[in-house]
Image: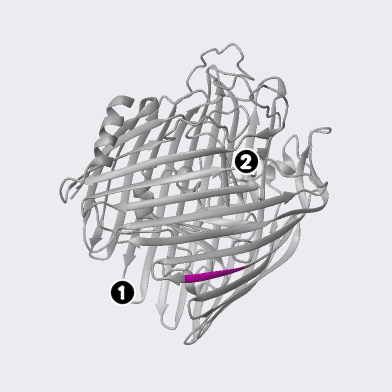
């Protein structure tokens, strides 16, 4: 489907008066069920002083986006940077922290790659298929999840089957030769409940190296397109044997092929073939007031890089974890949680050619944690402590407290926590590794207020500060990873306002200020000091809905960046993006939908010399029975 056809379909959708009457807004203080902040089911309001954002399935659907990366980009306190189009490497900066300090999970299973340089979580290949909600917790949560959760965690939670069976299928197409087909089913039969989905996305894409950047392409040459394919299969299966005993399982598999460019060169014939398999099985024994859960979870990730038909390097990262968690309601309003786990990760890498090298290493750790939650009138309190014993680094203790107090229409909240990140296997044992590295540590706190101003209107602001010690960085002189003495500091303010001025109309505004400073007093790269967003959603009728998303991202530092006159500035320009989306339900079984991204065709770069999409349009149709 070409761009003109998509624009016509979208125009029709946006102008029609005819969609679903559900009304949603981004909630910061509401009753949405969350699990990531405490490892137990809670509403946001009962998670104490935790800073949590929930992106619901309805919000994902309204955005019309294909990837988790694009859905999360507007989240307060979170910055995502891509090295090109869909499928390329992404960096997630939460509250200004390094991307390796953010733990990414699917149904609670860590998907940070043990074989990547810094054990980061790459959202580039994560599609929105079969997702019930995305929970974003900001602030140190190593007390619950151990390494990599120094700045916060992102948990992608998949759908579960319900009493009402459903089958759906759809197809869509649009700019850059993009097409997507998908199908799924969910329901419950006897002991089994299930939700499964399969999708295939393909795009011709555009050059990852920015051909419109005249500082790196002064002659205005046309670069070759970097295409992308993604196949994702997801399944969530539950077995309820009786009122006390159940088994919950989730599986997710992604196979993707990306054509990519490296550096400032337009490379043809370079591809990355990636596979990710994650799974979890949890046996749950529920004898109220005590719930016992025994679980096993794992991830297996492969990356193969090719140059002109020959392998240039291969990577495999494997992680598995056995664990137990017990939740006891001691008295009404007081829940104590205890957990034990054993985690093992391994990484293999082989590089070919002039700089041939290889390594094959593994590491294991044991941990125990204890958490207490209190709800006494307007006071909500969460406190926890964790001890983790790593076979290389020894023992580490982390802790966290997160109280909140509600009186009238006002909520006061606070949290303080410590965290750590063990060096990755690549940082330790690769040709660039350093076996003397120790774990990074952090101390972070935040304090905020949330206020209901009137019916349908509420606002809030949170100040945060986090100090990172013994940060691991790469020394370009010795070409080795090193421990940086001193403290790297991030601090700032996250704020929001929600308003429902009329039935069917909702508005959400956000603003984030982030200040960063490394141990040498330098600002960290690719983190904007200022970022603002505005989301609006309007139910035109019980059949039609339109929505818009605006993001303003301020200037930020980046190595090599230049001005429009190609003078060295070391700074990327600010930019404004406006996206539109709409949908129309023809009947109870058929829905039309579409979106226009970058409505005003803004030229911008998230990373110096890497391209971003121009104005692009997409439309599709979904059948549900």
Q: Residue at x 32, y 68 (%)?
A: 240
The dominant secondary structure in magenta is: strand
In contact (CB < 8 Å): disc 1 and disc 2:
no
Q: Give whichever of discs 1 and 2 has the lower sequence position.
A: 2
Mark 1–mark 2 distance (CA, rounded to whole Å)? 43 Å
**Picture quarter containing residue 80?**
top right
As drawn, 280 above or below 71: below
**Magenta part of the protein: which range?**
448-452
Q: Which residue is mark 1?
A: 242
Answer left or right for 214 relative to 175. Answer: right
Q: Is residue 372 above or below residue 422?
A: below
- Residue 390, percent from left and from top: 70, 59
Along the viewing direction, whichever of 20 and 58 lies nearer the viewer: 20
Residue 317: which quarter of the image?
top right
State the residue in front, 151 or 241: 151
- Disc number at residue 116? 2
Image location (x, y in percent) of residue 228: 44, 29
């Amino acid at each position: 489907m070409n761009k003109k056809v998509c624009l016509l379909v979208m125009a029709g959708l946006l102008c029609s008066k005819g969609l679903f009457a559900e009304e949603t807004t981004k909630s910061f203080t509401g009753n949405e069920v969350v699990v990531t902040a405490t490892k137990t089911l809670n509403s946001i309001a009962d998670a104490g002083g935790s800073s949590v954002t929930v992106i619901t399935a309805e919000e994902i659907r309204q955005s019309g986006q294909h990837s988790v990366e694009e859905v999360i980009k507007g989240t307060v306190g979170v910055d995502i940077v891509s090295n090109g189009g869909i499928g390329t490497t992404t960096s997630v900066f939460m509250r200004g922290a390094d991307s390796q300090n953010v733990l990414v999970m699917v149904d609670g299973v860590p998907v940070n790659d043990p074989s990547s340089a810094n054990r980061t979580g790459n959202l580039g290949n994560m599609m929105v298929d079969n997702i019930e909600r995305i929970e974003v917790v900001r602030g140190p949560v190593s007390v619950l999840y151990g390494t990599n959760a120094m700045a916060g965690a992102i948990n992608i939670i998949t759908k579960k089957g319900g009493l009402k069976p459903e089958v759906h299928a759809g197809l869509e197409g649009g700019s850059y030769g993009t097409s997507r087909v998908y199908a799924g089913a969910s329901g419950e039969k006897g002991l089994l409940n299930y939700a499964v989905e399969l999708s295939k996305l393909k795009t011709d894409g555009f050059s990852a190296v920015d051909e419109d950047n005249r500082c790196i392409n002064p002659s205005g040459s046309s670069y070759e397109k970097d295409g992308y394919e993604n196949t994702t299969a997801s399944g969530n299966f539950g077995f309820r044997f009786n009122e006390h005993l159940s088994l919950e399982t989730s599986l997710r598999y992604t196979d993707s092929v990306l054509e990519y460019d490296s550096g400032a060169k337009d490379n043809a014939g370079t591809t990355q073939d990636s596979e990710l398999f994650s799974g979890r099985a949890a046996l749950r024994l529920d004898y109220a007031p005590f719930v016992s859960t025994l679980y096993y979870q794992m991830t297996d990730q492969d990356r193969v890089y090719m140059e002109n038909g020959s392998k240039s390097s291969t990577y495999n990262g494997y992680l598995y974890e056995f664990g137990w968690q017990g939740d006891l309601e001691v008295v009404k309003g007081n829940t104590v949680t205890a957990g034990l786990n054993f985690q093992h990760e391994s990484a293999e890498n082989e590089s070919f050619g002039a700089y041939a090298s290889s390594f094959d290493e593994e590491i294991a750790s044991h941990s125990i944690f204890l958490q207490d939650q209190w709800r006494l009138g307007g006071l909500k309190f969460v406190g926890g402590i964790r001890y983790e014993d790593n076979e290389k680094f020894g023992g580490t203790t982390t802790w966290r407290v997160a109280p909140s107090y509600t009186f009238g229409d006002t909520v006061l909240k606070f949290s303080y926590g410590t965290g750590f990140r063990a060096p990755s296997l690549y940082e330790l044992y690769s040709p660039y590794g350093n076996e003397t590295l120790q774990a990074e540590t952090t101390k972070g706190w935040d304090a905020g207020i949330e206020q209901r101003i009137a019916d349908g209107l509420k606002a809030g602001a949170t100040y945060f500060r986090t100090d990172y010690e013994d940060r691991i960085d790469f020394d370009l002189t010795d070409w080795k990873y090193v421990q940086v003495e001193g403290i790297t500091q991030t601090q700032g303010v996250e704020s929001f306002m929600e308003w429902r001025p009329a039935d069917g109309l909702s508005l959400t505004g956000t603003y984030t200020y982030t200040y960063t400073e490394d141990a040498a007093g330098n600002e960290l790269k690719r983190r904007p000091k200022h970022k603002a967003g505005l989301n609006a959603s309007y139910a035109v009728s019980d059949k039609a809905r339109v929505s818009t998303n605006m993001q303003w991202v301020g200037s930020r530092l980046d190595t090599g960046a230049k001005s429009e006159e190609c003078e060295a500035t070391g700074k990327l320009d600010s930019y404004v993006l406006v996206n539109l989306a709409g949908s129309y339900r023809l009947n109870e079984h058929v829905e039309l939908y579409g979106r226009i991204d970058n409505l005003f065709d803004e030229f911008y770069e998230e990373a110096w010399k890497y391209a971003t999409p121009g104005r692009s349009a997409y439309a599709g149709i979904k059948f549900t029975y």
